[in-house]
Amino acid sequence: MNIIIHRGTHQIGGSAIEISTKSTRIMLDFGKELSLDEKYIPENLDIEGVTAGVPNCDGIVISHYHMDHLGQLTSALPEIPLYMGALSKEVAMIAAEYQDKDLYLRLLGANTFCGGEAFSIGDIRIRPLVIDHSAADNYMFVIEAEGKRVLYTGDFRMHGLRHHVLHKLVNTYIGEIDVLITEGTLLSRDADDCISEVAVLEDISSYIQDGKYVFVMCSSTNIDRIMGIWQNMPSDKVLICDAYQKRILDTVINNVYYESSLYRRHDRPLVLNKGPYPKYYMNHGFVSLVRGTENFISQIKALPKDDVRIIYSMWTGYIEENLALKALLETYPTYICHASGHVAKDDLTKFIELVNPDAIIPVHTDNPERLEELAPHRNVYVVNDNEPFII
């Protein structure tokens, strides 16, 4: 079995990993590069047989719907089949319908899989396992071929609402692993004070009590957080959102392929905001899910400042690239409470001990060498983009 990390050995985002045997070739994720630098020009993936030339790839398998894992799919040759989680596909298509019609059309024909149910592409057997991340229907993959076993984590964390399932997954499905390909997004951070998703939801619930008009700014596809907020709303307030957000939530709740107690419909109202806030909610107060767009910022600024509270629940790095948002958060009472979607350094070392792989390749990181320091007794291989690794 051969492994080639086409992108991601020394950068966060833009993941693209090739697994091949003598007869089969697949890609794991096919992401778009991310950068906060306005002068940065992302590079398209250029892989013979995948993005150019005669098709020579039996499938592209997507771990989840974040753009740094599927945003380059429009560059892949149209003859190559796509595979992704059933719910993940639906959520990705909603976002693409609004933002990228070409990506929407590419996703339309994607094959779908469900957690725990193995499937094969050629002589490569793939078992997708649902794992916690800031995206719903997110997967890691156990890859088996030619007598070898590889575990690709995709993006994951151990401080989310599903942290308790990890030991069961390892004991039931993962077993002995020859190579672990693991994300290392947080390896370059000095601190390891990772806040849990439970703590974030508790803080948000407390802050909601502090204002008449409360605006929660978080990713529209961070479903665990939104559902946690919705399910713990105070009885005297309603949750308001726009049509885009409501469509995503309805899709998650009504999805028949993904069962989760976190996503069950409940009695607390979800109000669709089609324009000015109705007089009843203006009088009694509300909680509104918003994004950092010009439209939402204008809505917030139109309300009495003393009655407004903003809860910013995303990575703070996004604030610096949005000057209007930065000015808003500096002007209005703002609480910042967020939990990363990625595994903390201490948790990553615990996960490595739990899985006990023969070899480890860090990806989705700008500091892979840090893992060598954190796990000195392990066989950590720091490879470069496009460098073959043969098992």
Image (cartoon, grey):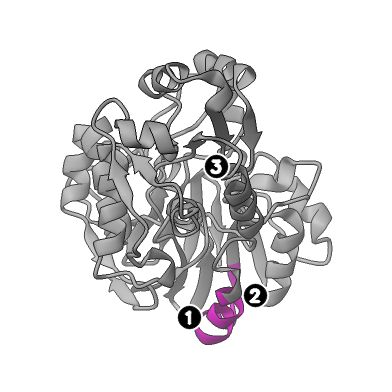
Residue range in magenta is 165-179
Asked if labels 1 and 3 touch by Cβ distance under 8 angstroms, the answer is no
Q: Earlier in the sequence, mark 2 or mark 1?
A: 1
> In 3D space, how far apart are the residues under numbered discs 3 and 2 (Cα atoms)?
25 Å
Q: Position of residue 260 (x, y in %)?
A: 40, 71
Q: Callout 3: helix, strand or loop?
A: loop
- Please tell me the numbered disc located at residue 385: 3
Tell me which amino acid carries mark 3: Asp
Report the predominant secondary structure element of the magenta stretch.
helix
Q: Callout 2: helix, strand or loop?
A: helix
Q: Is residue 297 visible?
A: yes
Please determine whether, in this image, residue 357 is positioned above or below residue 108.
below
Q: Report the residue at 80% width, 61% height from top.
A: 375
Q: Position of residue 193 (x, y in %)?
A: 78, 50
Q: Is residue 371 magenta?
A: no
Q: Report the residue at 58% width, 85% height from top.
A: 171
Tell me which amino acid carries mark 2: Val
Q: Is residue 176 left or right of residue 84?
A: right
Please determine whether, in this image, residue 20 is positioned above or below residue 29.
below
Question: Which residue is under mark 1?
Answer: 147
> In 3D space, how far apart are the residues under numbered discs 2 and 1 (Cα atoms)?
18 Å
Q: Earlier in the sequence, mark 3 or mark 2?
A: 2
Q: Is residue 57 visible?
A: no
- Please tell me the numbered disc located at residue 355: 2
